[in-house]
Image (cartoon, rainbow, N blue to C red):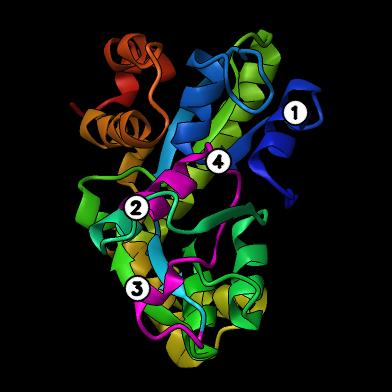
Amino acid sequence: MAVVSSPAQFASLEAGEFDVVFTSPDNVLAYRFLPDNPLEHLLNVKVLAGVDRGLGLSLWTTPAVTDVANVAGSVVGVDVPQSGFAFVAFALLQREGLAPGQYTVESLGSTPRRAEMLIEGRCAATILNAGNELRASAQGCHFVSSVTDLGPYLGTVLAALDDVGHSEAQARQRFVDVILATSRDLLSGELDEVACEVASLALGLNDVESRSHLAVLKDPRNGLILGGRLSLAALRTLVDLRREFRPSEALDRVEVSLRELGDDASFVD
């Protein structure tokens, strides 16, 4: 089920409307450790598995903005201003010479919604990924830079509340196993045709764009994570972005508690 924003997603998770969510690991970090998160209270949430490294997460401008310098004084669309994707947008804009305060930040919701708004010119720039960047490119939007310029990155994880019963834990582990098996088959090439067909139907991509999306899924810097293992280096990139754009003393505890986000066997370093 699609959600309108990450705060809505975690409110639904807390309410028991969702058992497992696909989300940014920065959200898990915020809701587990940082009381100033959008819900303004902590949740006992954990990462069940890493899914991808960003899936082409990158900064794009609307068709009318051919020079990123012209984003100054205009709207930058984000999910919510204190979220991981927003911090990526701020960091990539800063690398282009635009500091926070030189543009207006607006909460425009989920990535597909922001893609539509960028295409329509309702924001000057935003962060896109997961095939939405290909849709935007086809409509004349302009690529600026990639999250890979910031270091190792963890884009999507499977997350859930930690305090569940044995039967529920077993059920969601079966779900995780299916997702990881599908990722393995995608990376091996067994599902190439199916993946392209699904990308075409779900994202409205043509054949060339669907093949480009498949290449992103398999890309070792952007794509799917074999086995769902978590990288501490990638998690530290998230902490560094928060230190830069939403500093908090609570981040000192986060940095030494990153392994609490998942099980010990979940990490590769």
In the rendering, at what x and y percent does residue 105 appear? 56, 53
Q: Nearer the viewer, mark 4 or mark 1?
A: 1
Secondary element under disc 2, as helix, strand or loop, is loop
Is residue 215 among what the camera can see?
Answer: no
Question: Residue 34: x and y, percent?
Answer: 51, 16
Task: Check residue 69 in the rendering and tell me which mark sits there, or answer none.
Answer: 3
* Image location of residue 262, percent across then percent down: 41, 20
Closest to the observer: 39 or 172?
A: 39
- The residue located at (28%, 25%) in the rendering is 267
| Distance in Å between CA atoms under marks 1 and 2 | 32 Å
* Residue on which disc 2 sits: 99
Q: Residues within 10 Å of mark 4 (few under 14, many from 20)?
A: many
Asked if residue 268 lies left or right of residue 257, the reply is left
Q: Residue at x 39, y 51 (%)?
A: 90
User: What residue is disc 4 on?
Assistant: 23
Residue type, mark 4 in image: Thr
First in sequence, mark 1 or 2: give its number. Answer: 1
Q: Residues within 10 Å of mark 3 (few under 14, many from 20)?
A: few
Separation of residues labelled 1 and 3 (CA atoms): 37 Å
Specify the label residue 11 is tagged with: 1
> Which of the 4 image quadrants contains residue 123?
bottom right
Disc 3 or 2, which lies upstream in sequence?
Answer: 3
Direction from residue 258 to residue 27 in the image, left or right: right
Under mark 3, the amino acid is: Ala
Looking at this view, is 126 or 3 the one in front? Answer: 126
